[in-house]
Image (cartoon, rainbow, N blue to C red):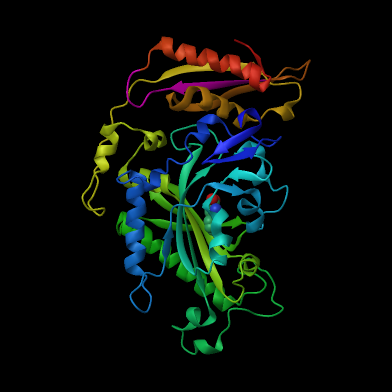
Amino acid sequence: IGQDSVAVLGHSYPRDDFTNVTPRILAKVGLNLHNQSHHPLWLIKERIKAHFYSAYVGRWGNPLFSVHDNLSPVVTVEQNFDSLLIPPGHPSRKKGDNYYLNRKTMLRAHTSAHQRELVSSGLDAFLLVGDVYRRDEIDASHYPVFHQMEGVRLFSNHELFSEVQHGQDLSLFEAAGRRTPQKQETHSLEAVKLLEFNLKLTLTRLVTQLFGEDLEVRWVDCYFPFTHPSFEMEVRFQGDWMEVLGCGVMEQELLISAGAGHKAGWAFGLGLERLAMVLFGIPDIRLFWSQDQRFLKQFQVDDVQQPVCFQPLSKFPPLHNHISFWLPEDEDDFTENDFYELVRSIGGDLVEKVSLVDQFTQPNTGRRSQCYSIIYRHTERTLTQQEVRLVHQEIERSAETELGVQGRY
Ligand code: PHE
């Protein structure tokens, strides 16, 4: 294989001008933290499964939702974007935000990438858990690999209206309708209102089950290309509103393309780290990748419902460093995520936070300069200035050779 292709999970993918996965990222593929028994992400997945299994049963006592947690994170660009009606050129497709194996293949950026295939396979109600990959900033709540749970539920005309008086006279669809802020053109308003109500009730029940009755929840209108109307759920955490999931009424065009055009449905996607951080009081997202038994053994419960009282590990002291450089002449060659990526690929989990602290443009030449602060901290021991200096110098060198910046060191 060698230089001209990338190997992932036993397959090899030819490199091209879109290839931007790094060895550090590839090393995470296949770890499947959500399937490692007693890992906090596994624990939260098990609690959510238990809730759906007991709260939603079919006519013969069978669980309504099936659970899928073993789909490969390697997907086609078509699955990740086109299948969800995300148009060509949409900003979410940027190389700077995603990990491409090549122009055709990528590491999924969200579990929604599998909506169409699972609906096509005939499922009406499912949960799907998986690792997702996004190039992003670096701080205590962002990590380039995280985990999502997708939920989808479809309804036939009969299923949606069976509880409603005279429901047999109502219809999911209406001809010649218009798209409004409330609904899609083909949906009837009564169908959408019931779907929206069922969606919000399902999710409110879920977070209430996880966090208890006292949790404050609010709904915010938002936009996704594959749902309309769309919402975000926020929960109140330590005084602030925190976004935990996106959801909405599925675009009918997507269901039609999946062969389920006679049904209507909702979908949601929630971030498991976010929920686990709040639920267990985990202060830093890097801890999910820790092999430290002082961390992992705290989740070794006999019963998944047993409360976990997480004792934060003592924090070791941070080391602050700065780096300043001139951006390349052609600024299109450089995005901030390129720098974050480089820092992460060299500094690894020693890096707690990177932030752009200053930038300026030199008046005569028009050249731009940026200054970043990097906070180094090991979650398991005290770092020395010497070892951090080696890493920091390597970042300085690589920024010049890999990104074409000119150091002001
Ligand atoms: N995929 C969306 C995201 O990652 C979340 C989402 C899922 C929104 C399903 C609507 C429906 O942000």
Query: Residue 124 location in percent, x, y?
Result: 49, 70
- Identity of the residue drawn at 51% across and 49% down: 72
- Toward the front, the furthest residue is 1
Task: Judge by depth and name the residue closer to the eye, 146 or 20.
Answer: 20
Specify whether 114 is left or right of 5: left
Query: Residue 363 location in percent, x, y?
Result: 76, 17
Q: Quadrant of the N terminus?
A: top right
The answer to whether any part of residue 244 appears in the image is yes
Q: Per the image, is 361 magenta?
A: no
Image quadrant in which you'd find residue 378 = top left
- Identity of the residue drawn at 68% across and 69% down: 179
User: Eyeballing the image, is 386 above or below 206?
Assistant: above
How many numbered tags mark residues here? 0
- Toward the right, the furthest residue is 364
Image quadrant in which you'd find residue 294 = top left
- Identity of the residue drawn at 54% across and 66% down: 121
Specify whether 128 is left or right of 42: right
User: Eyeballing the image, is 226 above or below 42?
Assistant: below
The answer to whether any part of residue 238 appears in the image is no
Q: Quadrant of the C terminus?
A: top right
User: Eyeballing the image, is 286 above or below 222?
Assistant: above
Query: Residue 350 location in percent, x, y?
Result: 43, 24
User: Eyeballing the image, is 74 above or below 368?
Assistant: below
Task: Judge by depth and name the residue closer to the eye, 186 or 197.
Answer: 186
Specify whether 406 is left or right of 203: right
Q: Per the image, is 374 magenta?
A: yes
Dividing the image into four quarters, tell me where ligand 1 lies: bottom right
Query: Residue 188 location in percent, x, y?
Result: 61, 77
Task: Judge by depth and name the residue closer to the eye, 105 or 377.
Answer: 105
Q: Which residues are magenta?
A: 369-382
